[in-house]
Image (tube, grey):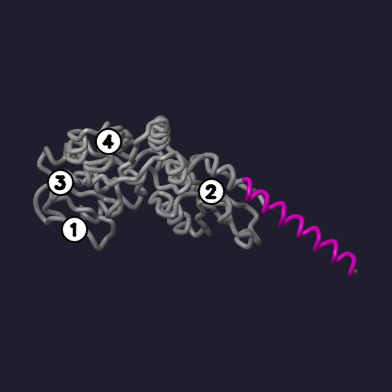
Amino acid sequence: MNVHLASHYGMCFGVRDALAATRSTYNESDVTVLGQLVHNPVVSQELTENGVKKGDLNNPTTGIGGTVIITAHGASESDRSRWSSTQSKVLDTTCPLVHKAHKSLVSLVDSGFFPVVIGKKGHAEVNGLVGDFPQAIVIEGDEDIFEVPYEGKIGIVSQTTQPIERVNELVEKIRSTRNACEVKFIDTVCAPTKNRQKAVKDLSKFCDLIVVVGGSNSNNTAQLVSKVEGLGCRAVQVERPEDLIFDWFIGAKDVGVTAGTSTLEETVTSVSERIKAISDEMALKDRECLGKERILC
């Protein structure tokens, strides 16, 4: 069994920088992350073990007097201002590409466009994007398009981790059903997401199975699984090497490995090593079976 690692996978620079900034606070006595730093259980466990508490972005009484951390997913300007007015030290680890999405949406609204965000409802990044615009509409699927106004100017941005093909599809459906509207779309899907989606598409062309490493609550990990399955290839999602099941690999000749943007490099390495160990176990069993057949003959 051959194991192939995607050409682009795992932790992006925005998450990596946010984690590095948070790790630099481990020697402080009172540190609170406002939400989940990244959607990764391994990282969450590390933070807990180092005394980092989890707080609520919407509750400015959390962690007063200590250090509070805005996650890589970002926050609305109103939330950011509210926290800056407290006695807490605010460490803002918002991904620069999420900041760019915020600026794009602000520019659209300032130009008179009605704000529309394509993304997952309730996701921390999406909540931050629409937080300063109570009139904004979040489009998660086709069923949400009816909420978009039928007149005026419509300005659209996307959650940075959405698959660009799906985003373009939704934008075109809005355009085709809003003929009287001026529709402007600014592509805010980040390059790391596009690269990982393309890389997993390439793997799907020749792999029998693709293992996607990432948190079960990670949106971009789920999107990678969906991408693989949509291409007709079998996909499984794991958080740790312990999640791998031997029977998944029976009959597989080529196995691909990729990972969401919140997944640690060491986790990807350990999962890949475990898959190779499973491959060795399967080869040994095949040799043992062949030997028994020869004895019977």
Q: CA distance from mark 3 to mark 4?
A: 16 Å
The quadrant where residue 146 appears: bottom left
Q: Which mark is residue 177?
A: 1
Residue 126 % position (x, y): 26, 48
User: 167 and 126: which one is in front?
Assistant: 126
Q: CA distance from mark 3 to mark 2?
A: 40 Å
Region in magenta: 273-296
The quadrant where residue 121 appears: bottom left
Residue 172 % position (x, y): 25, 52
* Tag 4 residue: 99
Q: Which mark is residue 144?
A: none
* Tag 3 residue: 133
Residue 280 drawn above or below residue 143: above
Q: Give the residue drawn at x 47%, y 55%.
A: 228
Badge 4: few (under 14), some or many (20 or more) residues near its Cα, within 10 Å?
Answer: some
* Dot 2: element: helix
Q: CA distance from mark 2 to mark 4?
A: 31 Å
Q: Pointer 3 and pointer 4: residues touching (CB < 8 Å)? A: no
Is 223 contained in the magenta span? Answer: no
Between disc 1 and disc 3, the foreground one is 3
Badge 1: few (under 14), some or many (20 or more) residues near its Cα, within 10 Å?
Answer: few
Left or right of 274 on screen, residue 236: left
Residue 56 % position (x, y): 27, 47
* Dot 1: element: helix
* Kind of residue at disc 2: Leu
First in sequence: mark 1 or mark 3? 3
First in sequence: mark 3 or mark 2? 3
